[in-house]
Image: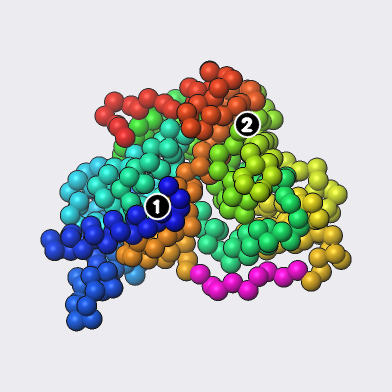
Amino acid sequence: MTSRENRLKRRDFLQKSVAGAALAGLVTVPRHVLGGAGHTPPSEKVNLACIGVGNRGWQLIRGMADQNIVALCDVDSRYLAEASTRFEKAKTYRDFRTMLDQESKTIDAVVVATPDHVHVPASVMAMKMGKHCYTEKPLGHNIHEVRTATQVARRYGLATQLGNTGHSGHNYRGVVELIKAGTIGEVKEVHAWCENEWETPPRVVGALRSRDRPQGTPPVPEYLAWDLWLGPAPYRPYHPVYHPMHWRGWWDFGNGRLGDMGCHLIDLPFSALDLTYPLTVETDGPKAHPESAPPWLISTWTFPARGDLPPVELTWYDGNKRPELLKEVNPPDSNWPWYVLFVGADGVLIAGIETFKVYPEDKFAGVRRPRLPRGPSHAQEWLTACKTGSPTGCHFDYSGPLTETVLLGTVAHRAGRKLEWDSEGMKVTNCPEANQFIRRAYREGWTL
């Protein structure tokens, strides 16, 4: 099914299901869905629940405060208390499963902003209940989870959006148009890089010097429901090196810097070059550690030709590594922290989240960003889709393959081999032992 057919199918599904549910008073319905100028719907707003309301979740929910925030969920009572002071009418929960069960007739859509290992369990449960879903990046913790979420979203015809907000930005959209227009000629090579380090709070700096699992069993803080924080991940004792913030560096919960930022930066070549699933992936970096992500990593994927577009080699760098080609381009600031470099037959384009440059500068002096109409914000695009069935830029059919590509980089690192990828079969064909990282068993009591 084409993307357009899928959007039409979803729109038809939404209009029928929303109109039917409205008779029972279950959902928010805009006037133009039900029709009739004299009809006043229950509301023009979406009934939202947010799963994970600290840090990024707090930013998201504040940005959607003009909607009906009906339920808040977090395993950390500090975050929950802060959010509930802003949204006094919202019911509060510690366990998202309880929230979804008890608020099933109230909620239209959910925002999922938990640590990575809970993204898909929360999103899939919500989608199976017919709730639209905005999920922070990466879409899931492992490839099997991501594929499952993609399939469930498609089956239920829901409005979905991955939280890589740069995709909706004016600069990203303009760069996509420049590449698609052939400004620098045919592109067969792309590089993306990102700095590595997070700020380390003094109270855990000593523990973070080691990549091994920390020793000792500090008491679980009263504010934290530790068992719920672990969710489907294997059990381990609480330690402050995990919560808050530093869980990304541990394989049980995250996928290192590539998992953190890959969906933001690799999104740009994915969109500009119509990429989907890679054929191969290999990495360079320190020897893989069984517990934690590496301090630096270089990952390279190869993609097949797509119609008239040639094969592409895409390379990622973190831990302050940079492409050698950057020395030849010699940009004014070679320490740019988050950038993508497209190598075309006629020139080179370097793009960040908010800016870009084209080289050689004298050859491309007249190149300007296309005049595009200002689009809605990433969140607003999704909220509109929840109400009308209109398309989103990072729906799961697009962001699923993007996330799978990112996570394949960590699989190759952990396997220590160049991998050949069978996307249809969702398996590595030349290194069977690598497939243990494609899916993991859930802890008892947790399912998809």
Residues shaded magenta = 367-375
> Magenta includes 370?
yes
Confirm whether residue 71 shows in the render.
yes
Q: Quadrant of residue 278?
A: top right
The percent coordinates of residue 222 (x first, y second) are 31, 41
Which labelled disc corresponds to residue 18?
A: none
Q: Residue furthest left?
A: 24
Q: Which residue is mark 2?
A: 280
The percent coordinates of residue 17 (x first, y second) are 23, 57
| Magenta highlight: main SS | loop
**Residue type for callout 1:** Asn
Front residue of 100/362: it is: 362
Which labelled disc corresponds to residue 6?
A: 1
Closer to us: mark 2 or mark 1? 1
- Upstream in sequence: badge 2 or badge 1: 1
**What residue do we see at 63% from left, 59% from top?**
176
**What residue do we see at 37% from left, 49% from top?**
112
The percent coordinates of residue 120 (x first, y second) are 38, 40
Q: Is residue 131 left or right of residue 22?
A: right
**What residue do we see at 68% from left, 61% from top?**
181
Label 2 SS? strand
